[in-house]
Amino acid sequence: MLIHEVDLDETVLAQLIHFSEDWTVENSCYGYRPNDKSDIEGNRIFFAEDDGNIVGYLFGKVYQSKQMKSIMPEGTPYFEVEELYVTPEKRSQGIGENLFRFVEDAVKSEAEYMVLSTATKNWKAIFHFYLDELDMTFWSARLFKKIER
């Protein structure tokens, strides 16, 4: 398994868009749609490769905190994970965890926290992954229910 940071070029962009199209078909997240160039530009991009094939990615960027005082002081640098994706056939093999930990190490000189949001439909599995396996801390939740008429 090779995990590395890549620069955004047309090949990387095409691969990320292709993965996001596959993710959309999975219908595993509320409101997820395929990415376009504007969704990806400006982010740091990391690929996981297995036998020369890209099997996962993570992208995000560093921000300065605003209105997050319950977890960090104003202006604290944090890395916002925009997307973390592993191909279905490679899931539950440690690739997502290795990607996350690689990025955490890569950004630790410029960020004090890793932050992410999720709109997954399989929240139990995702919470297990992020809370139990990656030692993240739960911060908040936004829930919804359609009102029946």
Image (cartoon, grey):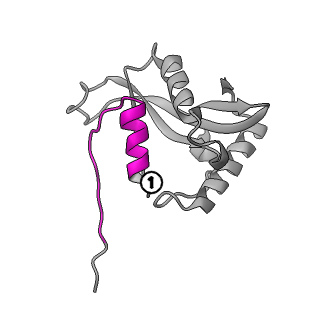
Work out which residue is located at the far left of the displayed protein and give it: 70
Q: Nearer the viewer, residue 108 or 68?
A: 108
SS under mark 1: loop
> Which residue does the numbered mark 1 point to in the structure image?
120
- Crowding at dot 1, Cα within 10 Å, few <14 / some 14-19 / many 20+, comes out as some
Tell me, yes or no, if residue 39 can be seen here.
yes
Work out which residue is located at the far top of the displayed protein and give it: 109
How many dots with numbers? 1
Q: Magenta stretch containing residue 144, yes or no?
A: yes
Could you tell me the amino acid type at mark 1? Thr
Query: Which span is picked out in magenta?
Result: 124-145
In the rendered view of the protein, which quadrant contains the C terminus?
Answer: bottom left
Q: Position of residue 100 (x, y in %)?
A: 51, 29
Q: Nearer the viewer, residue 70 or 120?
A: 120
Work out which residue is located at the far bottom of the displayed protein and give it: 149
Q: Position of residue 4 (x, y in %)?
A: 66, 23
- Image point (56%, 27%), residue name: 98
- Image point (46%, 60%), residue name: 30
Q: Position of residue 9 (x, y in %)?
A: 74, 34
